[in-house]
Amino acid sequence: MTTDSPLLSVRNIRSGYGPIEALHDISLDVFPGEVVTLLGSNGAGKTTTLMCISGIQPLITGEIWFDGSNISSMPAHERLKLGLAQVPEGRRIFPRLTVKDNLRLGAYSRTNKDEVRTSEEYVYSLFPILRQRASQLGGTLSGGEQQMLAIGRALMSRPRMLLLDEPSMGIAPLLVRKIFETLAQLNQEGMTILLIEQNAHLALKLASRGYVLETGAIILSGDSSLLVADPRVREAYLGA
Ligand code: ATP
């Protein structure tokens, strides 16, 4: 389900690290209610693109618009308040805090305790294992459970859009399945998602559209059904 104006619009951005330009001229749109995936090999610039959107990585030129506002120079915490929540690569949960405290940190900018409690219940309903582990330290969870916690923590800010960086990385297949089923459920409930995922089969199954990055530039984009059929995608990312 899409409407005419994008929720997120990335316009001709360039970004890099010191003298090295990692993104050359990236433009992409994500419409409300869509799941869009970014495909590309290691070092193509996927993570850098996501960090530019969440505000961790500065732009050299170009613009990023979210819900009609130019957020190009807005600090990351303000973008989060606007509803853009990132689930970073490698999960980055707090290993010495309990699961419950990790979740509550995700709601740090919210003041209504009843509403925060409701969000916590919602996260537990999505990932029942987190309720069982609520008083355990984050660091004692398996990789897959930590990924669920990282997604849960992002949801605690009540985002309008989730930015996900490699949610299946290093995770047992059964838990990967659970995580992708939950992402599909979130999307059915209206969540807009931009997804980086090494497993292109999974990514193109969940997403309705995708962009393919190569050395800092988009070389191909389109509906997932077209990308799945494209010989370049099949050869490079689908092992066909
Ligand atoms: P991966 O799947 O390996 O994470 P990616 O597509 O996400 O790859 P990026 O991590 O965005 O790619 O990297 C894009 C380019 O920027 C690469 O050439 C990479 O070496 C470089 N790069 C990334 N992070 C840094 C950094 N902190 N300092 C210097 N160069 C970096």
Image (spheres, grey):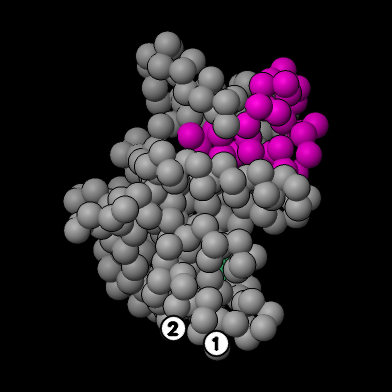
> Percent position (x, y) of residue 237?
62, 77
Tell me where the magenta segment starts and ends, as one range: 127-155
Tag count in the figure? 2
Tag 1 residue: 232
- Whether residue 61 appears in magenta in the rendering, the answer is no
Q: Secondary structure at mark 2?
A: strand
Point out the tag, 2 or 1, that comes first from the N-terminus. Answer: 2
Asked which quadrant contains residue 196, the reply is bottom right
Q: Identify whether 47 is placed above or below 218.
A: above
Residue 17 seen from this side:
no
Q: Secondary structure at mark 1?
A: helix
| Residue furthest top as drawn | 114
Whole-number angstrom distance, CA of label 2 to CA of label 1: 10 Å
Image position of 83 (left or right of 92): left
Single out the mark in the foreground, 2 or 1: 1
Q: Identify whether 47 is placed above or below 56.
A: below
Decide which of 203, 79 is in the foreground and name it: 203
Residue at image point 48% right, 29% down: 156
